[in-house]
Amino acid sequence: MKKLPIIAIVGRANVGKSSLFNAVLNRREAIVAREPGTTRDSITAKASVWTTADQKSQKKIRKDFWLVDTAGIKSPDDDFELTIQEQISQAAESADIIWVVVEADVQITDEDRRVAKMALKSGKIVFLLVNKIDRAKGIDLDIFTRLGIKTIIHTSATTHRGMDSLLGQLAESIPNATIEEASNRIRIALLGRPNVGKSYLFNTLAKKQQAIVADRAGTTRDINRVIVKYTGREIELMDTAGIRRSGKIGQGVEYFSVLRALSAIEQADVCLLLMDVNELNVALDQKIAGMVKDSGKGLILVVSKWDSAAEKTAFSRDTLAPEIAANYSFVPWAPLIFTSSVTGQNVTKIFDLAVEIVERRKLRIPTPELNRLLSEAVGAHPPAGLKNRTPKLNYIVQETDNSVPAFKIFGSQTKFLHWSYRRYLERVIRDRYDFVGTPLQLWFIEKHVAHRAGDRPREIS
């Protein structure tokens, strides 16, 4: 596998970089809005382009590359903005090809000249994308040759005009390389309220400055991703925007940021719920934990900023752990860890827990073992039922095609089982097989109904 080329999209704010990014990917990966400065972090995604190997065979070859969407370039007014501008420079330096984006219906600005000069000075292959070409009626487009970039392509991200030409020239400029995703890759999403330290932990886990860290809420908007290797396994980290209470979610960009965070839950294998040690047991944190549980994903409760509480005598693991466990009694299987991104305390243990959770989620239990366990559980504590109806539980099988550990329990009068008995059976299964960090699904099915419908249980080899 050859080194994959990196394509960086740069330009001043609001020229349509994120729209072009989405158009190339053919999906809404970056947030697009009319307000300038929407993109803050450099967003990276895998993309592909197809080209013909030769005229005789007409065989198609797939070429993979990394596409990087950057924030709009402008003069840094403060340290926060300077961090963004430094990140743009890093993206351009690491890129093999730079796409400089300008607006077709706007005269060349000083920022455009500065971007073009920076790109040409890098010595990399540079394309000038004159975007929003559908607005440029009656405008002399030859003026953009003054920027000194030879390869000029007229594009419209909204109508996809010029996209075939752009991708065609790109295919001629990059080597044959494909991305082979590891089958054992683990995806971890960092979740929590704004400003609880998600990006700080993300950077510490990734061991590089991948996301922007600032002492203000709402810094991360898109899902920021990085892939690291740990004990021979590929781990994809996803940093997400802070989730606010429904009444606190603003319109526009912030609303879509929350949607990206919810999307990250669906994409993840394991979710880290970060809780600020100085603001524990917040109702919204519990709601997020419930969302992860309902999605059937692995969950680790992470108390962040532990270094800030180290000198406070009121704080100790022994006093806080029972309090947190009581407030998260609906996810008693979620491990609790105290971390500090500043000191690095327990950070690598997060990887160990995530790997263990993923392995437990893959555990498959033979049907005879399960039925012996069910027989022991029912013998020790028979179900009482409700309304003078006594449920009978006959046998149990594990679903083999479900990403969440799931079990079908067949019997009669199962609808009269008390909820506490369902919890009892789950606890029995967990005590025997240690399904740490993951929810379980128990489905109670009337035996005669299942057989009449032809839905017979499947054996596990």
Image: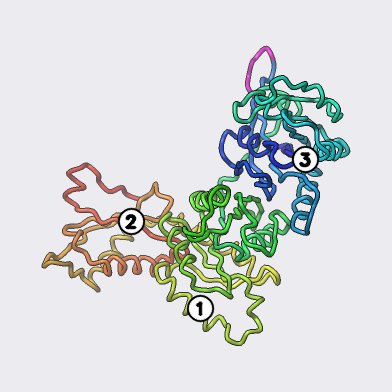
Q: Which residue is mark 2?
A: 407
Q: Amino acid at mark 2?
A: Phe
Circle 1 — which element?
Answer: helix
Residue 103 lies in the magenta-colored region: no
Circle 3 — which element?
Answer: loop
- Would you place residue 204 above or below residue 28 in this image? below
Q: Is residue 175 visible?
A: no
Q: Extreme left residue here?
A: 388
On residue 61, the disc is none
The first of marks 2 and 1 along the sequence is 1
In percent of the image, x 64 and y 15: which residue is there?
57
- Using the rendered view, name the quadrant where residue 232 is placed: bottom right
Q: Is residue 173 visible?
A: yes
Q: Nearer the viewer, residue 443 or 240?
A: 240
Q: Which residue is mark 1?
A: 321
- Would you place residue 420 above or below residue 50 in this image? below
Kindly report the distance in space between the C-alpha atoms of the residues bearing marks 3 and 2.
Answer: 49 Å
Q: Nearer the viewer, mark 2 or mark 1?
A: 1
On residue 95, the disc is 3
How many marks overall?
3
Tell me whether circle 1 and circle 3 mark residues in contact (CB < 8 Å): no
The first of marks 1 and 3 along the sequence is 3
The first of marks 3 and 2 along the sequence is 3
In percent of the image, x 33 and y 61: which residue is there?
369
Where is residue 370 shown, x and y percent of the image? Answer: 32, 60
Apparent side of residue 354 relative to residue 364 in the rendered image (left or right): right
Q: Amino acid at mark 1?
A: Ala
Kindly report the distance in space between the C-alpha atoms of the residues bearing marks 2 and 1.
Answer: 30 Å
Where is residue 206 shown, x and y percent of the image? Answer: 68, 57
- Using the rendered view, name the quadrant where residue 10 is placed: top right
